[in-house]
Structures are given as structure tokens and as C-alpha cells.
Image (tube, grey):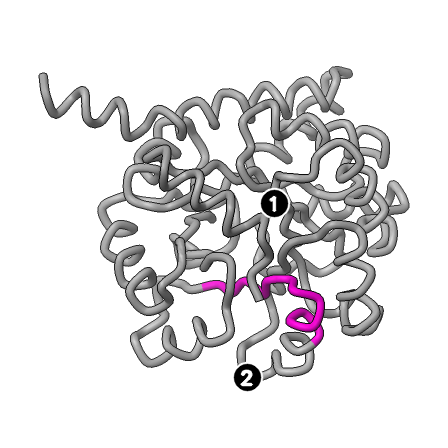
Amino acid sequence: MTTARIDARFAELKAQGRAGFIPYVMTGDPSRDEALEILKGLPAAGADIIELGLAFSDPMAEGPPIQRAALRGLKAGMTLRGTLDLVAEFRKSDDTTPLILMGYLNPVESYGYARFAKEAAEAGVDGLIAVDCPPEEAGDLAAAMDAEQISLIRLATPTSDDARLATIVQGTSGFVYYVSVAGVTGVLEAQASSVAPAVERVRKASGLPVAVGFGVKTPERAAEIARVADAVVVGSVLVDEVAAALQGGQSAVTRVLDKVRELSTAVRGARTSASVAETV
């Protein structure tokens, strides 16, 4: 079921008349301490909701940037339990920003659904996106999440027809994540013209806010998507900032948070700037 933090944040965004900004960062990338510093800095940099990637060796839906980030996280020693510890540290100073874990089913299944749900709730996790868990196989996981009031958030794609969409949204809570392009993360770019009708269709089917991700790379594109979606998710360009920082001997924390500020500013002002342009 939906946790209070997710509902409250989308209610705030609706009242403010704007889309939310959801940055995706990888747990443990490039190190535990730097990842924690990034995590703690995201709300002040403009994050409305945070997606924290679970480091995993076989992230099948990800393009090269997030694949490399996952490997850096694993090399730094990050585990599922370590990720929950990071969340608990984050919650010591922030009790309002919704935090969603995004990853793959294997680590969660190995950990045990009931144990994972209980410890995730204790740490302060609000939702889970299990990319490779189809609705037909999600019964036990959904039951464990519901028992701890953690949202199980599902993905809809450009190939999800009406019949499939009805199955996807059943039992989904918090919001629906709309994958704007066919393919992996960080390769193709989202197009607002094709995203807009899809978002309306998903909203109608689910009755939930719709966050759009996969294929949002620039402030300009983020602003375009923010005009038609309830939230915009950006990930690959942020983990690319970590890689660039490592290559250039710079601070990964500074580079990531600077990029988040740039993107969140574009998202926050998107609808206002569009309204001004229409009146000119």
C-alpha cells in the first residue's frame, strides 16, 4: 500500500501546480561515504522524491552508464543490507522526502521478502521498483510489501496495450513509472509528443500519478516532459557525473548535486515558463 510520504509529496506537487523531480543515484557509487553525502544533499538540490539504485551484477534494463555505476557500487562493497543502512542514515536528517529503491528481484528474493520488507520499513524506505518482476509473479513480494505499507511501484512501457496496462496497475501504489522509450536506460531520448498521450492513458488506467523516466538527458528535455507528466526521473546523466568526476580527479558529490540543481530547476519552472510563453 502507498506510504504517507509518497502521497503527501504528490499532493504538495499538485497544489504547487508543478511536476516533481526524481533523481536516480546508485547505492555505494563511488564509495559508501560519498554515496551517503550525495543522498543527503539531494533534497536541498531539488529532489522531490529519490530513487536509489540497488547495486546488482546483471541490471538487464540498464544501459552502459548505470551498468558501470552498479559495478562501482559492488566494488565499493555495497550490499542490500548496506543500502538499508544508508537509508537509515539519511532518515536521521530527513523524514519527509520519499525514497524508492529501484533494482532487480534476485537480491531481494535471496534476502527473503518478509525480512527485506520489515528491515526496509524500519530503515525508512517508501517504495520498491523491482524491474524484472512481472505482476503475475509478484504475489508473495506484494504481500510482504503491503504488510509493511511499502509501495510496490510498477513499470508501464510504450508496448503496454490496454489489457496489459490493466494487469500492470493492479496492486500498484504510490505512482506508476512510465518507461518513455523502448530499450535500456541512457540510450534513446524521450519525446514529449509521444509521452503525453501515454501518460494520460496510464493515469486513466491507474488513478495514480505518472513519473516518466528512461531517455531524459537534458534540462530542456526534462522541462518538456515535466509539462505533461506528474514527475520526471533522471538517472544516467547523474551516474555519468560520478564517472566524469573519477576520471578528472574531482568531487563526485559536487558534480552530481550541481547537475541535480540544473535539472530540478528546469523541471520546477517548466509549466510556469510554458504559461508565460503562451501569453506572449
Q: Amino acid at mark 2?
A: Glu
From this view, report whether residue 244 is shown above or below residue 237: above
Residue 231 in the image: x percent, y percent?
Answer: 42, 43
Position of 214 compared to 55: left or right? left
Regarding mark 1 in the picture, which secondary structure is present there? Answer: loop
Name which residue lies at 28% across and 58% down.
198
The image shows a total of numbered marks equal to: 2
Query: Mark 2 = which residue?
Result: 136
Q: Residues within 10 Å of mark 1 (few under 14, many from 20)?
A: many
Q: Considering the image in quadrants, where does the N terminus appear?
A: bottom right
166 or 151, which is in the foreground? 151
Name which residue lies at 90% across and 46% down.
77
Q: Considering the image in quadrants, where does the C terminus appear?
A: top left
Query: Marks 2 and 1, how far apart in space?
Result: 27 Å
Regarding mark 2 in the picture, which secondary structure is present there? Answer: helix
Say whether residue 145 is magenta: yes
Q: Residue furthest right?
A: 77
Mark 2 or mark 1: which comes first in sequence? 1
Tell whether label 1 touches label 2 (CB within 8 Å). Answer: no
When asked about the image quadrant of residue 128, the answer is bottom right
Residue 156 in the image: x percent, y percent?
Answer: 42, 64
Q: Residues within 10 Å of mark 2 (few under 14, many from 20)?
A: few
Query: Mark 1 = which residue?
Result: 98
Name which residue lies at 35% across and 35% down.
18
Name which residue lies at 80% across and 55% down.
122
From this view, report whether residue 266 is shown above or below residue 230: above
Magenta span: 144-155
Say whether residue 95 is magenta: no
